[in-house]
Structures are given as structure tokens and as C-alpha cells.
Amino acid sequence: MVVLSVILIFVMSGCNYDLYYGKRPFDYGAATWVCENPSAWFVVNPEDDEYYSPKGEIICDNQTCRVKFRFVHGTNEVLIYIERDKLSGVSRYEICGKCKFSPEKFVIKIDKDRDDFFNGQYDEWVFIRTPAEE
């Protein structure tokens, strides 16, 4: 009975365990993360209410669009939401990918089937961290 209880506690607590805790861009403090291809950036600001979903910009067809990153808890998946202003209103797009994290850069392997903005043009995006001025 004791063994069963220990196993049950382990299994239940394991459901909430996050293998990527402390590894995502927002875990490294205030910084700007920049990608050259495609041209994109976002800012991590610990004082922002949406600290865990950093915002920035991405350029496509010489147009600057708003972008928001949502790192999915417990996984290495990121959802990228892009808003493009058009004369008829705002168009929203979504890109999904899997990340490899490190303190100075992270790489997003783009899921081409879930890229309705660039339509699979990029295999991966590489972001480099620039710490914020203290």
C-alpha cells in the first residue's frame, strides 16, 4: 500500500513537471532577442504584465507586423501570433515550432504545416540574446 501511494504521488506530481523550466527566453531576464532570417525581434521585460508572452515585430514584404510569442508550458513548443495591418482590417496568422533553448540563443524548428504566414519558407529561426542595459 505504501509503494502504491508513493507511485501515485510521483505520477500526479509528474504531470505538472516542466522539463523546460528556467530555459525559455523569459527565464534569462530582461533582453532583446533578434532573428536575422526572417527579420524579427522581441523584448523580454520582467516588469511587463505579459512577461511570459513577449512581443515584438517581424518584417515581411517590407511591412512591419506585430508578433507575440507564447511558450507552451511543459513543452518546447512555441506558438507565434502575427498581426498584419491591411486596409480592410487586421489579419492574424499563426506559426508553430519546437525550440532548442540556451542562455544566449534559441532556435525554433518551424512546423511547415502550421505556418500560415510564410507558408513554409523557413526551416528554422535563430534568435540571439542581447541583454537589456542595466
Image (cartoon, rainbow, N blue to C red):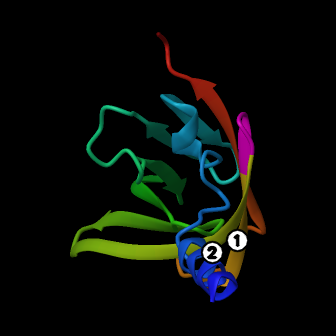
Q: Is residue 111 visible?
A: yes
Please state the horizontal and vertical placement of residue 68, each as a whole percent of the image: 42, 57
Quadrant of the drawing holding the N terminus: bottom right
What type is the residue that disc 2 sits on?
A: Phe
Q: 63 left or right of 27?
A: left
Residue visible at 46% across and 37% down in the picture: 43
Q: Nearer the viewer, residue 44 or 12?
A: 12
| Residue 109 magenta-highlighted | no
Residue visible at 33% across and 74% down in the picture: 91
Q: Tell me the CA gap for discs 2 and 1.
A: 34 Å
What type is the residue that disc 1 sits on?
A: Ile
Q: Which element is circle 2 on?
A: helix
Q: Earlier in the sequence, mark 2 or mark 1?
A: 2
Residue visible at 36% across and 65% down in the picture: 83
Please state the horizontal and vertical placement of residue 89, each as a whole percent of the image: 21, 72
Q: Which stretch appears magenta?
A: 102-106
Q: Which residue is tagged 1?
A: 110
Q: Is residue 86 above or below residue 50?
A: below
Residue visible at 60% across and 52% down in the picture: 21
| Residue 103 magenta-highlighted | yes
Magenta stretch prevailing secondary structure? loop
Q: Is residue 121 visible?
A: no
Please state the horizontal and vertical placement of residue 34, each as a whole percent of the image: 61, 39
Hey, which quadrant is residue 121 in on the image? bottom right
Q: Nearer the viewer, mark 2 or mark 1?
A: 2
Q: Which residue is tagged 2?
A: 10
Q: 85 left or right of 120?
A: left
Q: Nearer the viewer, residue 64 or 10?
A: 10
Mark 2 neighbour density, 10 Å: few (under 14) some (14–19) many (20 or more)? few
Q: Which residue in the rendered view is the most extreme toward the front? A: 1
